[in-house]
Image: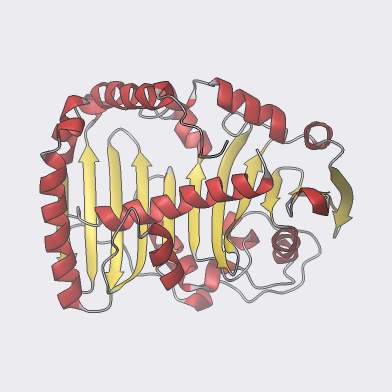
């Protein structure tokens, strides 16, 4: 997979999560209210350190990211809700492991995708924590990559003729992948030499969602809604005009719980958005394709509630629905994998 294609795919994942969260913005019991976001001052100003700090993955994301998507891969492997899906290495995943020098499921425990919109389009920085072998990485990257170091961390950069991408191990357990300037800036953040994304609006929302009651979340997604984001998802999602921030949290305990939060400019826009989303849910429940896969009953558990300038969505599925949902999702995944690949025009 080329660097540009990989970057587009990773960006697509993060943009899609943000867009789905915004389009889903609807189920939230009014009795469920997350604690207020921490003040920016709760994150210390950057100061030089004697060693890189990778304790918080968000602290390795340079300031300026608009979307943060954090996944607890270890929780996905362990949860009865998800392990049946992630435990099945298909041919594509095996090929990616050979190409990139690690298995994105088996070798990674936590991952954060940070998306920034630039003049050339979205750029994605991957911050992954787990088990990585420098020798395996070097062998996988091959001769087209140049080995170097940045602040003592091993780093590999693609030759200019092949694209602009870099891989680095900021510490033995934490891998970075993205544009070379972003990877170097992330290492600078780890050393306290540059501002990170935690003090930004998207960082505040990430902290709020991560701090909500319950066990450690399996997934946290947070986005600042910019005009660039609106243009990027316009073909798939029509975002509410007053939507400024959107986020989601997924918990996989005994029950499955999905919380989605949207912040709008005014309470009136929040109420209107909630009405529109309730209408969207009714339409989804009536779709034959979803009914054919047995998904419609699960949509009945989704609720929408405006709360001032916020719209909240909540979906809670009890433990006794787990096997049924897993079977439905497996059928969908298998159907997608079975679809023939249509070649692009001219190829």
Residue 84: x and y in percent read: 41, 22
> Which is nearer the eye, 226 or 302?
226
Quadrant of the rendered structure where residue 149 is?
A: bottom right
Residue 216 in view (yes/no) = no
Q: Please say if 167 is above or below 139.
A: below
> Which is nearer the eye, 54 or 306?
306
Residue 175: x and y in percent read: 70, 46
Q: Number of numbered discs present?
A: 0
Q: How is the image coloured?
A: secondary structure
Q: Please say if 42 is above or below 284.
A: below
Point out the image quarter for the N terminus. Answer: top right
> Which is nearer the eye, 101 or 291?
291
Residue 146: x and y in percent read: 87, 47
Q: Residue furthest front?
A: 346
Point out the image quarter for the C terminus. Answer: top right
Q: Please say if 41 is above or below 175.
A: below
In the rendered structure, the answer to whether residue 217 lies left or right of residue 116 reads left
Residue 296 in view (yes/no) = yes
In the rendered structure, the answer to whether residue 302 lies left or right of residue 325 reads left
In the rendered structure, the answer to whether residue 168 lies left or right of residue 62 reads right
Residue at 40% across / 24% down in the picture? Answer: 339
> Which is nearer the eye, 332 or 161?
161
Quadrant of the rendered structure where residue 285 is?
A: top left
Residue at 11% across / 62% down in the picture? Answer: 275
Residue at 22% across / 79% down in the picture? Answer: 266
Residue at 89% across / 51% down in the picture? Answer: 148
Residue 11: x and y in percent read: 52, 52
């Amino acid at each position: 997979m080329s660097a540009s294609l990989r970057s587009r795919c990773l960006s697509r994942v993060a943009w899609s999560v943000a867009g789905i969260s915004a389009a889903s913005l609807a189920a939230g019991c009014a009795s469920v209210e997350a604690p207020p976001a921490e003040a920016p001052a709760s994150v210390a100003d950057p100061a030089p350190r004697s060693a890189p700090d990778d304790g918080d993955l968000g602290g390795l994301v340079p300031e300026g990211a608009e979307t943060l998507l954090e996944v607890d891969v270890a929780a996905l492997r362990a949860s009865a809700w998800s392990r049946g899906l992630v435990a099945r290495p298909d041919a594509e995943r095996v090929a990616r492991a050979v190409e990139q020098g690690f298995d994105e499921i088996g070798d990674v425990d936590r991952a954060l995708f940070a998306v920034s919109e630039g003049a050339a389009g979205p750029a994605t920085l991957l911050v992954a924590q787990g088990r990585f072998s420098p020798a395996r990485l070097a062998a996988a990257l091959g001769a087209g990559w140049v080995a170097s170091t940045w602040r003592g961390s091993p780093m590999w950069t693609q030759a200019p003729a092949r694209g602009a991408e870099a891989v680095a191990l900021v510490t033995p357990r934490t891998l970075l992948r993205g544009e070379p300037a972003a990877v170097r800036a992330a290492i600078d953040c780890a050393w306290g030499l540059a501002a990170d994304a935690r003090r930004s609006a998207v960082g505040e929302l990430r902290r709020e969602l991560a701090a909500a009651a319950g066990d450690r979340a399996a997934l946290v997604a947070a986005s600042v809604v910019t005009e660039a984001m609106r243009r990027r998802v316009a073909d798939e999602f029509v975002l509410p005009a007053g939507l400024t921030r959107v986020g989601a949290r997924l918990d996989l305990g005994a029950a499955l719980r999905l919380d989605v939060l949207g912040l709008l400019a005014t309470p009136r826009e929040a109420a209107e958005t909630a009405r529109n989303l309730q209408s969207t849910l009714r339409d989804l429940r009536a779709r034959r394709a979803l009914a054919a896969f047995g998904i419609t009953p699960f949509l009945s558990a989704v609720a929408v509630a405006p709360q001032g300038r916020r719209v909240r969505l909540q979906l809670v599925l009890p433990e006794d629905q787990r096997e049924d949902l897993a079977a439905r999702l497996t059928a969908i995944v298998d159907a997608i994998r079975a679809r023939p690949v249509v070649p692009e025009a001219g190829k």
